[in-house]
């Protein structure tokens, strides 16, 4: 969480830009553990059935998440969570859990618990840090 707070602080000042190294560090410390718990069973090639990730969305690295999947578009649009499929799909699980794009899908919540409001807010802050 400290890493994410540092990125938020740096992005608040226009004199600083968040480096790729800072993003990677924040991802590993703050975001990857959330995705491991709720997304990896379907979206990490090491855990997904037959090694195939669903919808082409690979949650195993920051680079693959930024790229996004086949259906929902770019995973992360830095500075704009509203254009980032990662945020939109996990947020739908809070706002519209019956929506077919909500992640994780409601039918899989027993095995893949949805993220909490606080965890979704953490993903939003991570994406919006420029």
Image (cartoon, rainbow, N blue to C red):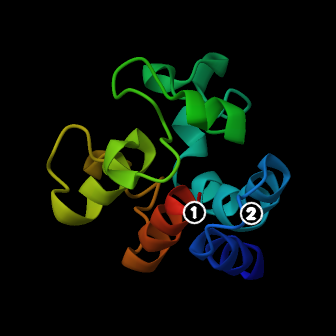
Give the left or right position of residue 96, taking residue 31 as reference. Answer: left
- Which percent across, then down, holds residue 27? 71, 57
Of the 4 image quadrants, the one containing the C terminus is bottom right
- Which percent across, then down, holds residue 33? 68, 61
In this picture, is 48 found above or below 50? Answer: below
Task: Check disc 2 and report the residue beneath it.
Answer: 26
Task: Check disc 1 and report the residue beneath it.
Answer: 129
Q: Is residue 69 visible?
A: yes
Give the left or right position of residue 78, taking residue 14 as reference. Answer: left
- Please say if the residues under marks 1 and 2 sit with CB atoms less than 8 Å apart: yes
Residue under the point 78% across and 47% down: 20
Residue under the point 65% across and 30% down: 64
- Which percent across, then down, holds residue 75? 48, 36
Looking at the image, which is closer to me, 78 or 103? 78
Q: Secondary structure at mark 2?
A: helix
Of the 4 image quadrants, the one containing the N terminus is bottom right
Quadrant of residue 83 within the rendered picture: top left
Looking at the image, which is closer to me, 9 or 122? 9
Quadrant of residue 37 within the rendered picture: bottom right
- Mark 2 crowdedness (10 Å alpha carbons): few <14, some 14-19, many ≥20: many
In this picture, is 112 found above or below 85? Answer: below
Give the left or right position of residue 102, taking residue 74 as reference. Answer: left
């Amino acid at each position: 969480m400290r890493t994410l707070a540092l990125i938020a602080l740096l992005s608040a000042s226009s004199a600083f830009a968040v480096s790729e190294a800072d993003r990677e560090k924040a991802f590993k410390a703050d975001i990857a553990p959330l995705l491991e718990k709720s997304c990896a069973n379907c979206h990490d090639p090491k855990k997904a059935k037959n090694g195939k990730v669903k919808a082409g969305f690979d949650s195993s690295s920051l680079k693959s998440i930024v790229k996004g999947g086949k259906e929902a578009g770019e995973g992360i649009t830095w500075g704009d969570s509203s254009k980032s499929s990662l945020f939109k799909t996990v947020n739908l699980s809070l706002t519209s859990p019956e929506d077919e794009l909500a992640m994780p899908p409601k039918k899989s919540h027993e095995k893949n618990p949805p993220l909490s409001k606080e965890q979704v807010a953490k993903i939003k802050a991570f994406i919006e840090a420029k």
